[in-house]
Amino acid sequence: MGTVASTAVGERTGPLDRLRALHAEGRLAGAYDEVPGLLAELAATGNPAGPPAPDLVRAGQLLSRLDAEEVLREHPGTDTFSVAVTGHSTLSGLKAPLTAELARHGMLLKLHEGDYDSWYRDLQDTGSELYASGADLALCVLDPDIVFDELPHPWLVEDVERVTVAKLGLIRQLAERYVTHGGGTLVLNTVPLLRTRLRSLVDSRSRARLGVVWREFNAGLLRLAAEHDRVHVVDLDPLIASSGPVNEPRLAAYAKVQLGEELLAGYAREAGHLARALRGRTKKVLVVDLDNTLWDGILGDDGPDGIAAATTYRGEAFGRFQKAVGQIGAQGVLLAVCSKNDIEPVRAVLRDHPDMVLRDGDFVQIVANWEPKDGNLLAIARKLNLGVDSFVFADDSPFECGLVARGLPGVAVVRLDEEPALHIERLLADGWFDLRELTAEDRARATQYRTEAARQDLMESAGSMEEYLAELGVEVTLSPVADHEIARVSQVTLRTNQFNLTTERLQQADVRARRDSDDGLVLAIRSADRFGDNGLVGVVLVSGVGADGAADGGWHIDNMLLSCRVFARGIEEACLAAVLREAAERGAGAVHARYRPTAKNHRVRTLYPSVGFAETGEDTDGTVSFRHDLTGEQLPTLPAHVRLTADFGRRAS
């Protein structure tokens, strides 16, 4: 240990050695901006089909000793994420992996740990730390003894059924209580049935009945996630299948560690995926290599007849990987190709080769050339009008993966290897594309982006931007959000970063509460043009619209968001003009608005002044306040090329 502690930070060491050296020298907080990259390297070394890499957990042990306030002093822009943990058994093994999982996704953990076996009290008492902490996530970790501790001795399957039914009813009530009074997302989990409990029954018929009862119990837990926007249930069965035993029997008996370290590490990884989704960090684009990634072989060396994604032993593994990629693409993830090849042979293979599951039409961008791949990813991002931090890059070349990881640290790099049978596991291990709920707009996203090529052609053929917009035929609808659109509006607030004036993130329950308030409006923006329907592309959040709005100083635009797909088409100006005119007609004295700067939303800094708002002040955090007095000469007109339909009344859902 002394050797590691004396390692100079500047020497070439492994990522864990570097973290240890920084910690030993007291410089880990100051170097916290390096942590996500170091942890990404550690995560890449793990078995994709198993629990997180042990070194990642060891890194979490170091990071959990940091003073969060010191990190924030050194790096004031660090995103903090608050988690409260409660449960039935000893959960000390959760802290290190949870710290590491959040840190590698760019979040600093603030942890509130409950007492041993305090889960019922914590959820029942709305004054408990679980509620008072204001946690983003409330983890209630359930284990088999919440049932078996209440069984008589000896017990029968009927006893288990009675207790599980009662326990499920109790958990349902507690979940509803948290949703009503808590501020975050409640995380529950399915409960594993231990082999020792099952084998305590000596007849196979009773074992089968116990299996049915236990699965019904877990199915009931999973249904809670479908019933409540702010309840999430981690299914432990797939984690157990990949991580091994539920616990270590001696630790379970003597220390009450009913869920083992490997299982808790897998659970922490799932919690990290959820935290990332809640922060709007879900990835949007999957960029894949071709040679030895989508197909077996090297097109330039072997020719079209020498590559395979079917018919051969190895080729079939690549075909399965193509199906997995296509499955992701069918759910709204944009697919792109970045390959060191000549473009025409690549297009010919994707169009005509009999082995290919994926075809050229499945990709929104196909880039095949001999330029560095980090530059090509930037070019794809510009074409899609997205940031590269929304990209996942999958490649079998260590050199290319290292190049992208170093040059574009915001890109999630999936390092495939020479074993194609593991490609799927490696791609899916980190849940980069996980969402709380899939919407109709998600499924249509790839089609919508493909129509951008036609728009680009029109723009290039037009004599001017004005001529292009006039020929585009932009149609906009602005109206209150309906029930079936709430999930999409929440998603817009979570995932939109470039055109997001305050970066306030809203869960579905928050959107619904605003929509149902007598004082507010949640206005969905939908757009279409000559090339098709773009769907719900944005939202305007307004408060102060009640009867007292004028007396209280007017309306407040709390936030406005717009998808990057429809930038610079006059949609934002048209919607703001409609809101201002509606406010004036209802007698509001003014409309107020705010802009909070971030690293990504600088392009909307001048939006409010462009439609007649005057700047009224700036806070210490850089937030700028604006006011529009709604006088006739200041009210903006609609852009001439936009046809707007606005409805500010409550719409039947």
Image (cartoon, rainbow, N blue to C red):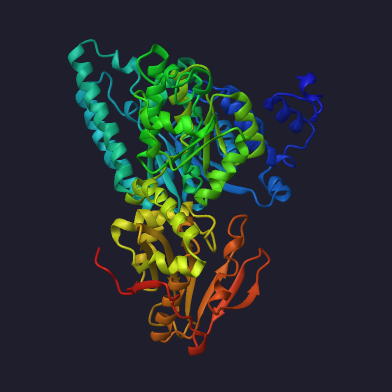
| Quarter in which the N terminus is drawn | top right
User: Residue pushed farthest top?
Assistant: 202
Q: Residue at x 66, y 65 (%)?
A: 622
Q: Nearer the viewer, residue 641 or 430?
A: 641
Q: Measuring from the top left, give residue 616's x and y in whole percent.
A: 62, 78
Q: For residue 597, say whether it is visible.
A: yes
Q: Is residue 254 left or right of residue 582?
A: right
Residue 570 % position (x, y) = 47, 69
Quadrant of the snapshot with the C terminus: bottom left
Residue displayed at 78% across by 25% down: 5
Taking depth in this image into account, of 604 and 428 the one nearest to the observer is: 604
Q: Is residue 321 left or right of residue 31?
A: left
Residue at the left extreme of this rendering: 205
Closer to the camera, 88 or 653? 653
Q: Position of residue 403 (x, y in %)?
A: 65, 32
Inspect this view and state whether residue 358 appears. Answer: no
Task: Tally the marks.
Answer: 0
Q: As drawn, is 4 to the left or to the right of 117?
A: right
> Where does the image place residue 133, in percent across and percent down from the top left?
52, 50
Image height of 37 relative to 83, above or below: above
Residue at image position (43%, 18%) is 421
In terms of depth relative to the viewer, which is nearer, 588 or 386?
386
